[in-house]
Amino acid sequence: MLTAIIDYESGNLHSAEKAFQRMARETGAGEVVVTSDADVVARADRLVLPGDGAFPACAAELRGHKGLYDAMVEAVEQKGRPFLGICVGMQLMATTGHEYEETPGLGWVAGDVVRITPADVALKVPHMGWNDLVIETEHPIFAGITSGDHVYFVHSYHFRVTNPGERLAHVDYGGPVTAVVGRDTMVGLQFHPEKSQAIGLRMIGNFLTWRP
């Protein structure tokens, strides 16, 4: 089994690589590699798309690596390979991003990425730090995890999902803020699992052993 963490020059992937490799060893899930090689992505058994920064810049970088982008899309859309988006990598699953300018996403989960607007004006944006998950839809990614478990966020925009059934979990930050999305063989996490201690590692392990 091979898990490819896609490197399209959008963020430092060292901590994510170490967390995924640790959980691959603990769960017997095979090899984890960070790669910008389209051939490796094409033959990988599961894919991880991280992302740090602004939606338009990440979208441009991803599409700018055309061979890598095409291999990822084919693996997910045609081969049904399990896919995990993290932070902006999760946001890129959306139909459209609205950070700075309107930017098309992958369109895998219908919805828009919009600025967080807490009802309580005392709450600052970006939404940064620990927050408690509210699980809305049971999913294998939540095995051993319950509402109230907390994970670590750093973001100013969130995924406003069109189909409520595809928002798997949210957190409260002056109103509901999307935390997890998913459908079919795809799942996305707005938070950073590699920075979320035991709960984040558990979710990484759940993804690595998920058989959709």
Image (cartoon, grey):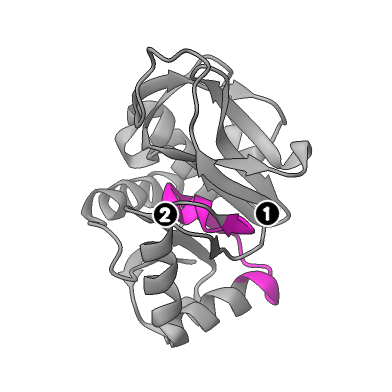
Give the residues drawn in magenta, as a range. 76-96
The residue positioned 53% from the left and 16% from the top of the image is: 119
Q: Quadrant of residue 109?
A: bottom right
Nearer-N-terminus badge (2/1):
2
Residue bearing mark 1: 109
Image coordinates for residue 28, horizontal then vertical, percent: 45, 52
Describe the element under mark 2 as helix, strand or loop: loop
Q: Amino acid at mark 1?
A: Val
Q: Tell which of 37 and 10 is nearer to you.
A: 10
Structural crowding at the residue carrying mark 1, measured as other residues with C-alpha within 10 Å and reported as few (<14), some (14–19) or many (≥20): many
Nearer the camera: disc 2 or disc 1: 2
Residue 44 vertical position relative to residue 192 in the rendered view, above or below: below
Q: Tell which of 33 and 194 is nearer to you.
A: 194
Q: Quadrant of residue 146?
A: top right
Residue 212 vertical position relative to residue 191 in the rendered view, above or below: below
* Quadrant of the frame with the C terminus: bottom right
Describe the element under mark 1 as helix, strand or loop: loop
Residue 115 vertical position relative to residue 209 in the rendered view, above or below: above
Q: Is residue 206 visible?
A: no
Marks 2 & 1, CB-CB < 8 Å contact: no
Q: Is residue 80 visible?
A: yes
Whether residue 92 is in magenta: the answer is yes
Instruction: Give how far apart the Cα atoms at labels 2 and 1 are.
Output: 21 Å
Residue bearing mark 2: 100
